[in-house]
């Protein structure tokens, strides 16, 4: 993993890469990976900290996916929650007893073992569900991409926002729609329980031991990081950035706009789906209340806070917001209003707090926690207008 | 380049473009021979850039047809037209600001590359090789247009105006085009730079066998370098011919070139 990351930086001074010399980058990457791997050993494997680590890793996967769409290709997507939903429902459909009549009441089972084998419903192996979630969300990503192809900027945001809302509404009202003998969704009641991850050679995961969950999530993070780094410094990555900078010039330079944009939507969506399938299994429910507009904003805030287009920045942004949302607000500072003699719950203010943080960020550090090097150079590098350049050097 | 020097590279017939009630280009026909430098001149708003945009696929003409090497490219997609061998620069420089000069030129070679999504993720040997090759070719193109090596990794946005023009031309050249469209390339250049660019265009034609279509306001450049000049006014072609014919064409002198140009005439 880390060697691949290092290799991807073929030119030390290229603007896409970090500002550090190559050995330092390799060292830091290795250290970060090693740190993430040993981290769970210091905490109670069923405790709250572990739970937060798992959630943070899952959010990193989503944020890195959204980073491809918004950060690399510059397509402002406000409906990313749709891909979370589609990934989660894929898990719900193919890894629970939701389709109780499937297989004539006997259930359909593929590559699953243990107690699940005798349950009704459709039960596929988790890896299989992951592949299906990736395919489903890639297609969904491209479908939402199609109507936005002729649009720019704000208008893309509006269409994607609507798409997210549509999926959210379908999730809520799907319990009143019946097709093929089953309901479309289970609405706010949620599909539960969802099969726990069952990997070949390992015991079925449980909700008491969270370490295996974390390592699966971490593996997903590594895969997504790898893909992000590889794509950033590739023909496709350059095409995305070119489109982000100037669509007309990019098209005139031979970049097929439709294909390039759809690849951004598809790739970004796939990671949302992957993370969604994982979270469905981890949270043990696929519940319509999870798929609200605020979740899209939550993920987008991670990308912006970390630094649009900056891979490590987005990782950091996702971890920071995840910890604030799932740990600091509900567990650490939640008693604060009561201590001050006020009568409300701090979690009700979550989005107010995120908004406040974003505003503060925009004032102090608009380029994000770890800015993409391109933007950093754009902001700080002096403009080279020395007159000597205007001599007759055109051959 | 098997075609003879006199063969037609690009032929536009009866091009008309209307934007609502406004006719920006009105029934213009013209041809670009292989290995030639031809110019379009005309006052501001004459429809020159609109015409360019039609040739490169950014606009679809209301009427008319464009043939490139005998192939119909009317209203083709810009990226496909680029791939066939028509590259351009813009009147207001349009570089990718947050990419380095080198990366800009690498983007110019997009249509000549083959790496796909999965190839790029896995970084297969062929992708690796291709990446290395286009990086080298981009550096060569930048040197060919005279951008010093120490500027290659500077962000395009931070380069001087003259260097940005160079990078834009290098980006267009990197795709190895047969026809290069230059939209007012000398705008904002001083006389020496303009002179150098003029010689550069001739060099492109002679060394690389390119045909060049030029939109230009600097009459010295137009008259000095073009083999053929087309004059547009209010979207209509009012004259065409060899530079000396245009220079002495009373209609052009009166309607467009004005007093100053007629004084320049020997």
Image (cartoon, coloured by chain):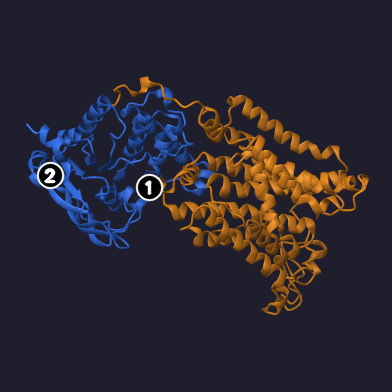
Chain colours: A orange, B blue
Q: Residues within 10 Å of mark 2 (few under 14, many from 20)?
A: few
Q: Position of residue A349 (x, y in %)?
A: 79, 51
Q: Which quadrant of the figure contains the C terminus of chain B?
A: top left
Foreground of the two, A191 or B77: B77
Marks 2/1 same chain: no
> Measuring 80% from the left and 46% from the top, which residue is drawn there?
A52
> Measuring 65% from the left and 49% from the top, which residue is drawn there?
A300
User: Would you place residue B5 above or below residue A164 in this image?
Assistant: above
**Pointer 2: what residue?**
B254
Q: Position of residue A63 (x, y in %)?
A: 65, 47
> Measuring 24% from the left and 59% from the top, which residue is drawn there?
B16
Q: Is residue A270 visible?
A: yes
Foreground of the two, B187 or B173: B187
Q: Is residue B155 left or right of residue A172?
A: left
- Mark 2 touching mark 1, by CB under 8 A? no
Residue A254 disc label: 1
Foreground of the two, A294 or A168: A294
Q: Which quadrant of the figure contains the N terminus of chain B?
A: top left
Q: Position of residue B239 (x, y in %)?
A: 12, 49
Q: Is residue A141 left or right of residue A37?
A: left
User: Would you place residue A132 above or below residue A185 in this image?
Assistant: above
**For the residues marked 2 and 1, what is the alpha-carbon distance in whole angstroms?**
41 Å
What is the chain identity of the residue bearing mark 1? Answer: A
The nearer-to-camera label among 2 and 1 is: 2
Q: Is residue A62 visible?
A: no
Q: SS for tag 2?
A: helix
What is the chain identity of the residue bearing mark 2? Answer: B
> Measuring 42% from the left and 40% from the top, which residue is drawn there?
B107
Foreground of the two, A131 or B223: B223
- Residue extending furthest front? B259
Q: Residues within 10 Å of mark 1 (few under 14, many from 20)?
A: many
Q: SS for tag 1?
A: loop
């Amino acid at each position: 993993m880390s060697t691949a990351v290092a290799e991807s930086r073929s030119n030390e001074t290229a603007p896409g890469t970090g500002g550090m010399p190559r050995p330092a980058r390799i060292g830091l990457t290795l250290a970060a990976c090693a740190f993430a791997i040993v981290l769970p050993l210091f905490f109670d494997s069923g405790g709250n900290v572990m739970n937060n680590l798992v959630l943070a890793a899952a959010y990193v996967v989503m944020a890195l996916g959204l980073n491809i769409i918004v950060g690399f290709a510059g397509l402002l997507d406000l409906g990313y929650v749709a891909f979370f939903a589609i990934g989660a429902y894929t898990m719900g459909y193919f890894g629970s007893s939701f389709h109780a009549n499937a297989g004539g009441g006997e259930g359909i089972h593929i590559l699953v073992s243990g107690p699940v084998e005798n349950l009704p419903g459709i039960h596929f192996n988790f890896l299989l569900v992951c592949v299906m979630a990736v395919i489903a969300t890639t297609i969904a990503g491209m479908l939402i991409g199609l109507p936005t192809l002729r649009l720019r900027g704000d208008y893309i945001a509006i269409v994607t926002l609507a798409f997210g809302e549509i999926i959210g509404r379908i999730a809520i009202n799907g319990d009143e729609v019946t097709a093929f003998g089953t309901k479309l969704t289970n609405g706010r009641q949620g599909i539960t329980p969802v099969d726990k991850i069952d990997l070949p050679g390992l015991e079925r995961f449980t909700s008491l031991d969270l370490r295996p969950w974390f390592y699966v999530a971490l593996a997903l993070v590594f895969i997504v990081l790898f893909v992000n780094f590889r794509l950033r410094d590739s023909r496709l990555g350059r095409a995305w950035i070119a489109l982000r900078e100037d669509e007309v010039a990019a098209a005139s330079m031979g970049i097929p706009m439709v294909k390039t944009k759809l690849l951004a939507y598809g790739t970004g969506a796939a990671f949302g789906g992957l993370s969604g399938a994982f979270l469905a299994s981890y949270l043990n429910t696929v519940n319509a209340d999870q798929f609200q507009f605020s979740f899209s904003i939550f993920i987008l805030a991670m990308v912006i806070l970390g630094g649009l287009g900056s891979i490590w920045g987005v990782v950091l942004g996702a971890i920071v917001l995840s910890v604030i949302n799932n740990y600091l607000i509900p567990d650490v500072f939640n008693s604060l209003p009561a201590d001050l003699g006020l009568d409300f719950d701090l979690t009700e203010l979550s989005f107010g707090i995120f908004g406040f943080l974003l505003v503060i960020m925009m004032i102090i550090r608009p380029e994000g926690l770890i800015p993409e090097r391109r933007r950093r150079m754009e902001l700080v590098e002096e403009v080279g207008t020395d007159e000597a350049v205007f001599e007759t050097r055109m051959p | 380049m098997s075609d003879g020097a006199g063969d037609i590279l690009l032929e536009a017939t009866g091009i008309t473009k209307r934007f609502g009630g406004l006719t920006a280009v009105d029934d213009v026909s013209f041809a670009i021979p292989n290995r030639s430098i031809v110019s379009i001149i005309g006052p501001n708003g004459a429809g020159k850039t609109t015409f360019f945009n039609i040739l490169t696929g950014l606009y679809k003409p209301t009427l008319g047809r464009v043939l490139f090497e005998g192939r119909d490219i009317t209203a083709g997609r810009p990226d496909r037209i680029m791939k066939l061998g028509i590259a351009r620069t813009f009147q207001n420089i349009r570089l990718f600001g947050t990419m380095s000069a080198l990366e800009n030129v690498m983007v110019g070679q997009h249509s000549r590359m083959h790496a796909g999504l999965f190839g790029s993720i896995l970084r297969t040997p062929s992708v690796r090789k291709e990446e290395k090759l286009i990086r080298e070719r981009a550096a060569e193109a930048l040197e060919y247009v005279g951008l010093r090596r120490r500027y290659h990794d500077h962000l395009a946005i931070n380069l001087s105006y003259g260097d940005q023009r160079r990078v834009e031309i290098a980006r267009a050249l990197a795709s190895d085009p047969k026809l290069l469209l230059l939209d007012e390339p000398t705008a904002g250049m001083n006389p020496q730079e303009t002179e150098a660019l003029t010689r550069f265009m001739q060099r492109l034609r002679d060394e690389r066998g390119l045909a060049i279509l030029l939109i230009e306001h600097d009459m010295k450049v137009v008259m000095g370098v073009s083999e053929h000049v087309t004059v547009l006014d209010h979207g209509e072609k009012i004259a065409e011919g060899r530079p000396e014919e245009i220079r002495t064409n009373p209609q052009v002198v009166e309607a467009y070139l004005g007093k100053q140009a007629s004084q320049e005439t020997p």
